[in-house]
Image (cartoon, coloured by chain):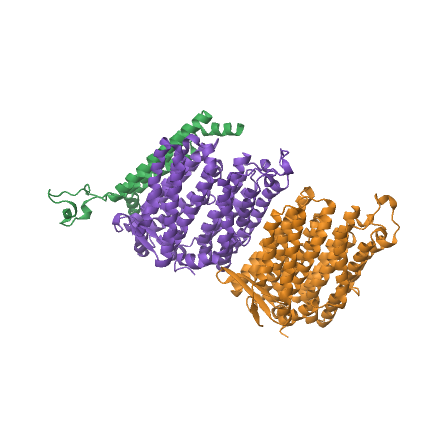
Chain colours: A purple, B green, C orange
């Protein structure tokens, strides 16, 4: 059984989605438990796979027993071995945490919501675990389409924001597909490892160059790298809380994973850094992304929108880190995939709790929230400290590696951008802390003892507090993650 | 000179798909009506599908179906060597079946979003929608 | 250097962290204060229990956990750290007594929050004192910044909000903008962040780079109030006086000065600084701060702001001492950490006592107050003498060493700076004392009859004033610790 974990990981939520869809018509109360069970099974499998990879090395799993290049291969190495549990745990925590808000918001459509949720989860897992380039496109679109559905279920401006996301997302995915097509033309194979084996003699052909460029641009559109980010703020802001807490932490990070996989496994570092000479320009693009993300975040009056611009800056961190081309930079990027997923989850869950009680994202409506919802706000502060990069939270350590990589490679502009972004984040988060801590709450009810704590329900609060504590735990054990997992995920060509 | 002409004419499938792709892209960006934009998305995707199918084509190739006598099934059917060059490549077709499904699904999602938007704003013209949003 | 492995440093840091839940759950204020006392006493006991080991010439290490491959959170108690830890932990208990008097006297709100963050701040201070490498130092430095923000903005009014902003901007801004890159560049150059006797940057990197790094570190530790990053200190005076007293006269600013000393000696090392002729650079920056701050203090009417600028000047004495790079000079600088702490805290306690008793904040309003509050103003006088550097107060000893040090290092200009700034100190302190004792009180200024402040306020300031006096006669163990530390560094 255990050797089939790669398949079980994916098939369980896939089948569960259909069961949930059916259950939604029969009895709505069954949807949530089925989803929890499915996600727990996947989480279990993903952790087991990671442990197996740490013990035995890379796992090759052929679906249906068909060997590549005919069959589709699943391929678990240190890199996706780390990302898989991150996805599972984030999705699971979010599922539990958003139970109440989903119930209140989507009463009759609960079946549909959970179906889409679990399907998106499947898509994300599939993107990470697959070793076949075309299979990745299929799963990419599964994740994207279900994402569109999840986002569009929000209020007011959600459908229009989703439609704009759809245009750009489809263009991005199509570019990726095109790139895969070019690769197929020159190599005749769709299996990633196979392509990597066949490509080296063909490195000077323009088809390979085109393939690389088109794939990269497609992935960049999907991850929201400035200036291809225009779809992100609106789509993530107007989505319902439960959806945005799933999509915001995961989607962009999975796309970063795809980029790293393409750069380092399919087109080896020798090609990307040795033959192509664009890494400097890409680092500059990420510098601009970081700075613009920070500057645009400063101009926002809407808490959730401010957070989405922070995500855009974080994408810049990871793209820059990967393209620095040295060990520390890539370690920072991979570490940040994990750290940023957890940080983003923490702040989005906190904002979800805030909006559940206060019904608004605008700064003006947040005054005095510290008094009313202290635990949520403390978790938000913890997330904010991590995003700023204060030790011993995990955000500090990924920044450590990124800055270290910048110094070692001589890209001081990247270091300056990272520091600038940290300083701007200080302003952003302490502005919120000021508004929620200083101004007295508007209609201060005359409750006993003057303290009127009206916190979010426990099912939403406890997961949030666990995630906030997790930020510091992850930070504390950074060395273990790096020594045991990440350093093996870095290909040998990188110093 | 003949070389360039050879390149242009020889690679006509590339030029066609690029042109189609740009038409779709133009529709997405420049058109005001949501349905036209969605059609643009579809054209964009179709261009890529066309490209893939075109790369599998060969001069003088036939349909990739093996013809053999009855009584031999499964693996035994390939008792004599196949000359792959006689058959057009079936793999891109197979891949594109999947891509077409994806394209249709995307179209479905996009159209349902358009319906939602129409119900809310009573119009499908983007500039009017934005105006109505700003009013609120 | 023989080292002993012990968990005591970690415990000393954790004591006040662990007491926070108890503080939060206390029903009655007396229980809450009782927990704070208990934590303070335990912390002081732990620190004191480690003192004999240090004084006998050994060091205590405690490696907690490796957080980045090659660097961990680690504690190393040596003479310098012990000196600072003794000062902070002893003063915490005294300040707690004072806080009770002050906060209850003014019926302040949010007292539980106050005591919790105070405990956290002290935890961070001891963490900095015992830090064994630059990463641990940075971690606790940032923790201190964050723990003191709610204390500075305690009153939660508009003034507190803008002061809090300034506080954050200067302190967190410089630590992220200067400290973090400096730390990472140093790590890149040296491959380690462990403080070592002759600095771990010895022999790595070009002269210019080392110079720039040194400046980044000095300005990065903005808590030390080196100009031009000093403005947060006067702004932070909006905090309740016990906060100002401990944090800004002792803990926060001392953490800044201590960190600079630690970095200059443990990261750069006196040899490197001497060979690159960076000593004069440090001296210039420190002297400028001393003179300008003392001059600004002359013009201040608000007593706490006057004391704030005095602190800025005094902190630069510590940096000045290190910049002299001579044995007596460095000893004087380190000793000043202790002497200034006791002297300044006495002054702040007095300022707060005056505010509790009369509600007055400005010197011009304090005429004749010495008649009404003789104990308080006597203590103020002693504190002022110590800061000026007059015998028989402890401050004289550290100033004496600084003077000897500048002679040793043949820096005559520094000698002039020292003497002139002492003169300036007298110029802004003596008028206060004069007005208090020798001016006739204007009866209309005082609404009620003025008595001394509550006993909980007067007792601590009397204690610290007596200690200030006592340190003149018995400067051990601080002098011994400072001398040991300097001998370690210079390899004597």
Q: In which quarter of the image is residue C308?
A: bottom right
Instruction: Using the image as rendered, state which of residue C118 and residue A427 is in the foreground.
Output: C118
Above or below C267: residue C351: above
Visible in this render: residue A304? no
Drawn side of residue C251 relative to residue C436, left or right? left
Instruction: Using the image as rendered, state which of residue A275 and residue A192 is in the foreground.
Output: A192
Q: Quadrant of the C terminus of chain A?
A: bottom left
Count of numbered marks: 0
Above or below C477: residue B31: above
Residue A238 x %, y %: 48, 35
Residue C384 x %, y %: 78, 59
Visible in this render: residue A343? yes
Residue at screen point 71% across, 60% down: C341
Residue C126 x %, y %: 62, 59
Drawn side of residue A426 relative to residue C333, left or right? left
Instruction: Using the image as rendered, state which of residue C324 and residue A113 is in the foreground.
Output: A113
> Given the current orientation, which residue lies at the most extreme top position?
B122
Q: Quadrant of residue A30?
A: top left
Instruction: Using the image as rendered, state which of residue C140 and residue A316 is in the foreground.
Output: C140
Above or below B31: residue C367: below
> Given the current orientation, which residue lies at the most extreme bottom position?
C492
Residue at screen point 70% across, 60% down: C316
Residue C272 x %, y %: 60, 69
> Given the current orientation, which residue lies at the most extreme right position?
C440
């Amino acid at each position: 059984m255990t050797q089939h974990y790669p398949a079980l990981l994916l098939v369980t939520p896939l089948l569960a989605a259909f069961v949930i869809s059916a259950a939604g018509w029969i009895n709505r109360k069954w949807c949530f438990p089925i989803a929890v069970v499915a996600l727990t099974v996947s989480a279990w499998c993903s952790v087991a796979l990671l442990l197996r990879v740490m013990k035995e090395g890379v796992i090759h799993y052929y679906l249906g027993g068909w060997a590549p290049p005919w069959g589709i291969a699943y391929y678990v190495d240190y890199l996706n071995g780390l990302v898989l549990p991150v996805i599972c745990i984030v999705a699971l925590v979010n599922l539990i945490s958003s139970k109440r808000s989903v119930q209140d918001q989507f009463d009759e459509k609960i079946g549909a919501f959970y179906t889409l949720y679990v399907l998106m989860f499947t898509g994300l897992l599939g993107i990470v675990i697959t070793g076949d380039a075309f299979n990745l496109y299929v799963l990419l679109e599964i994740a994207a389409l279900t994402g569109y559905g999840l986002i569009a279920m929000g209020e007011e401006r959600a459908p229009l924001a989703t439609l704009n996301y759809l245009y750009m997302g489809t263009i991005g995915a199509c570019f990726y597909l095109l790139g895969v097509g070019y690769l197929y033309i020159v190599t005749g194979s769709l299996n990633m490892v196979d392509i990597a084996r066949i490509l080296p003699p063909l490195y000077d052909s323009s088809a390979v160059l085109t393939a690389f460029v088109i794939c990269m641009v497609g992935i960049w559109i999907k991850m929201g790298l400035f200036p291809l980010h225009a779809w992100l703020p609106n789509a993530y802001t107007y989505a319902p809380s439960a959806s945005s807490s799933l999509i915001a932490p995961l989607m962009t990070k999975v796309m970063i994973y795809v980029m790293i996989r393409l750069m380092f496994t399919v087109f080896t570092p020798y090609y990307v850094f040795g033959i192509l000479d664009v890494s400097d320009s890409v680092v500059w693009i990420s510098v601009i992304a970081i700075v613009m993300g920070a500057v645009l975040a400063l101009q926002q009056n809407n808490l959730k929108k401010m957070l989405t611009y922070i995500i855009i800056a974080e994408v810049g961190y990871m793209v820059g880190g990967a393209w620095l081309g040295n060990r520390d930079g890539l370690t920072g990027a991979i570490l940040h995939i994990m750290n940023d997923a957890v940080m983003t989850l923490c702040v989005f869950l906190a904002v979800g709790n805030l909006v559940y009680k206060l019904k608004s994202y605008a700064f003006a409506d947040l005054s005095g929230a510290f008094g009313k919802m202290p635990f949520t706000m403390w978790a938000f502060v913890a997330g904010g400290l991590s995003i700023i990069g204060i030790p011993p939270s995990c955000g500090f350590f990924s920044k450590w590696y990124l800055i270290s990589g910048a110094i070692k490679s001589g890209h001081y502009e990247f270091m300056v951008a990272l520091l600038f972004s940290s300083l701007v984040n200080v302003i952003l988060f302490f502005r919120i802390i000021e508004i929620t801590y200083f101004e007295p709450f508007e209609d201060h009810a005359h409750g006993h003892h003057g303290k009127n704590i009206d916190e979010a329900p426990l099912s939403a609060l406890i997961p949030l507090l666990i995630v906030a504590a997790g930020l510091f735990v992850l930070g504390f054990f950074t060395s273990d993650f790096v020594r045991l997992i990440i350093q093996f995920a870095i290909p040998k060509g990188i110093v | 000179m003949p070389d360039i002409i050879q390149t242009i004419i020889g690679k006509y499938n590339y030029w066609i798909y690029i042109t189609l792709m740009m038409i779709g892209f133009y529709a997405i960006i420049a058109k005001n009506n949501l349905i036209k934009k969605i059609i643009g998305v579809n054209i964009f995707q179709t261009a890529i599908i066309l490209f893939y199918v075109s790369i599998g084509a060969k001069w003088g190739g036939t349909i990739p179906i093996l013809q053999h006598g009855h009584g031999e099934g499964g693996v035994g059917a390939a008792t004599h060597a196949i000359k792959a060059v006689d058959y057009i490549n079936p793999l891109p077709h197979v891949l594109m079946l999947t891509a077409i499904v994806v394209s249709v699904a995307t179209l479905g999602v996009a159209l349902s979003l358009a319906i939602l938007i129409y119900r809310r704003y009573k119009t499908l013209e983007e500039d009017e929608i934005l105006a109505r949003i700003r009013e609120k | 250097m023989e080292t002993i492995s012990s968990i005591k440093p970690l415990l000393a840091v954790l004591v006040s962290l662990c007491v926070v839940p108890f503080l939060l759950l206390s029903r009655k204020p007396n229980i809450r204060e009782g927990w704070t006392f208990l934590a303070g006493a335990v912390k002081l006991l732990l620190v004191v229990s480690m003192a004999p080991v240090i004084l006998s010439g050994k060091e205590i290490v405690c490696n907690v956990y490796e957080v980045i491959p090659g660097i961990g959170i680690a504690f190393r108690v040596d003479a310098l750290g012990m000196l600072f830890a003794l000062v902070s932990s002893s003063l915490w208990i005294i300040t707690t007594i004072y806080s009770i008097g002050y906060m209850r006297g003014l019926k302040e709100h949010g007292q539980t929050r106050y005591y919790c963050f105070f405990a956290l701040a002290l935890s961070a201070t001891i963490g900095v004192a015992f830090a064994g490498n630059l990463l641990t130092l940075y971690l606790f430095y940032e923790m201190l910044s964050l723990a003191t923000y709610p204390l500075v903005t305690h009153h939660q009014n508009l003034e507190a909000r803008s002061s809090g902003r300034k506080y954050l901007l200067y302190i967190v801004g410089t630590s992220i903008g200067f400290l973090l890159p400096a730390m990472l560049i140093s790590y890149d150059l040296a491959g380690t962040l462990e403080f070592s006797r002759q600095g771990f940057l010895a022999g790595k990197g070009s002269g210019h780079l080392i110079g720039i790094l040194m400046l980044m570190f000095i300005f990065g530790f903005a808590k030390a109030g080196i100009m031009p990053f000093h403005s947060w200190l006067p702004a932070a005076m909006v905090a309740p006086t016990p906060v100002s007293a401990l944090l800004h006269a002792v803990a926060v600013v001392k953490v800044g000065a201590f960190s600079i000393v630690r970095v200059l000696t443990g990261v750069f090392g006196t040899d490197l600084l001497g060979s690159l002729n960076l000593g004069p650079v440090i001296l210039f920056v420190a002297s400028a701060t001393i003179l300008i701050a003392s001059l600004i203090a002359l013009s201040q009417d608000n007593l706490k702001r006057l004391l704030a600028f005095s602190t800025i000047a005094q902190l630069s004495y510590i940096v000045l001492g290190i910049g002299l790079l001579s044995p007596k000079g460095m000893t004087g600088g380190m000793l000043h950490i202790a002497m200034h702490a006791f002297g300044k805290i006495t002054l702040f306690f007095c300022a707060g006592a005056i505010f509790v008793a009369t509600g007055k904040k400005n010197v011009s309003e304090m005429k004749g107050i010495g008649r009404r509050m003789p104990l308080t103003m006597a203590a103020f006088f002693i504190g002022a003498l110590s800061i000026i550097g007059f015998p028989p107060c402890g401050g004289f000893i550290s100033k004496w060493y600084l003077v000897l040090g500048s002679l040793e290092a043949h820096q005559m200009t520094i000698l002039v700076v020292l003497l002139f700034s002492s003169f300036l100190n007298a110029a802004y302190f003596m008028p206060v004392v004069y007005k208090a004792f020798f001016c006739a009180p204007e009866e209309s200024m005082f609404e009620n009859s003025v008595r001394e402040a509550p006993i909980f306020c007067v007792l601590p300031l009397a204690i610290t004033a007596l200690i200030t006096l006592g340190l003149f006669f018995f400067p051990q163990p601080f002098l011994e610790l400072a001398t040991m530390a300097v001998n370690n560094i210079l390899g004597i």
